Image (cartoon, helix red, strand yellow):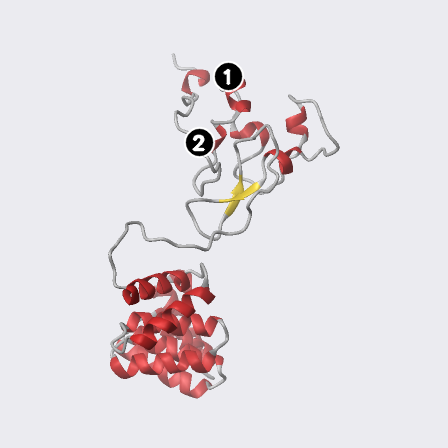
Amino acid sequence: MDTVSNAIYKPPAPSFPTPCGASAGTRFPIALQSACFRKSGGKLLCTTCHNPHAPQTVSSKTCLGCHSPHGESENCIGCHMPKRRTQDAVHVSLTDHRIARRPFQKANTAPQKTLHFYEAYELPPLDRALYLGLALVTDGADIRQGVCLLQNAIAQRPNTPVEARAGLARALAQQCRNPEALEQCEIALTSHPELATVRAECAKVLETLGRTQAALTEYRRALKDTPGLPSAALGIARTTSDPAEAETFCRLAAQSLPISA
């Protein structure tokens, strides 16, 4: 007959080192490398120190249940489990679960903003700048550097892909450089008037500039070109003066992409 103890997963000790001790994945494999886990005979689990599913601060009292206090500071967590920048994800810092014996003098907590290609692609310099610039602005890893790369590359390449101009427009709008963002949107629409997503982005810049009626016109046209486009439907809901129409288009956006509404 199975017992609870037989059903408990007892993971083997890791056979690989993790120099940085900070990964954006689960903390458990990192904790397996700690002396605390190894010397506990596998008894040290996540729940020994805290509820991993509840937001809370772990108290140093847990550490003092096994260790004697030393030094002037009683902040066991701050010294031996500092927050460190992850090596496999940008703009993320997480608690280091290696529980190092010697406190880190300078734990690097600054978000990692540098992006690199997964493979060493042999790309022409302008293409590399466009790809990297677009990656930097897409999720806000480093908007300032991304905008710089995109602007320099676009200035040297007349036939710039419309995706790069649209990305630059979004980033410029995030920097509150709305006239420049609008200029990029208009250039993109002149060459590709059929792109409803770019038209909706252009409309949002107009909306930010306070040109509500012009924005509403562009939102309507974008929705006509691509029925159900969430960004256009939400734009109409925000800019129309008709409450009933606003509710209608808000519901349409929710049906197309619930998270947007």
Q: Which residue is mark 2?
A: 29
Who's the residue at 38% across and 67% down the image? 149
Who's the residue at 47% across and 44% down the image? 86
Of the image marks 2 and 1, the number of the one nearer the N terminus: 2
Who's the residue at 43% across and 76% down the image? 237
Q: Is residue 261 above or below residue 77?
A: below
Residue 231 in view, yes or no: no
Residue 72 in view, yes or no: yes
Q: Residues within 10 Å of mark 1 (few under 14, many from 20)?
A: few
Q: Which residue is mark 1?
A: 41
Q: On the rendered image, what quadrant is the N terminus found in?
A: top left
Task: Describe residue 182's horizontal placement relative to residue 123 as left or right.
Answer: right
Residue kind at label 1, given as amino acid type: Gly
Q: Secondary structure at mark 1?
A: loop
Who's the residue at 47% across and 84% down the image? 241
Q: CA distance from mark 2 to mark 1?
A: 15 Å
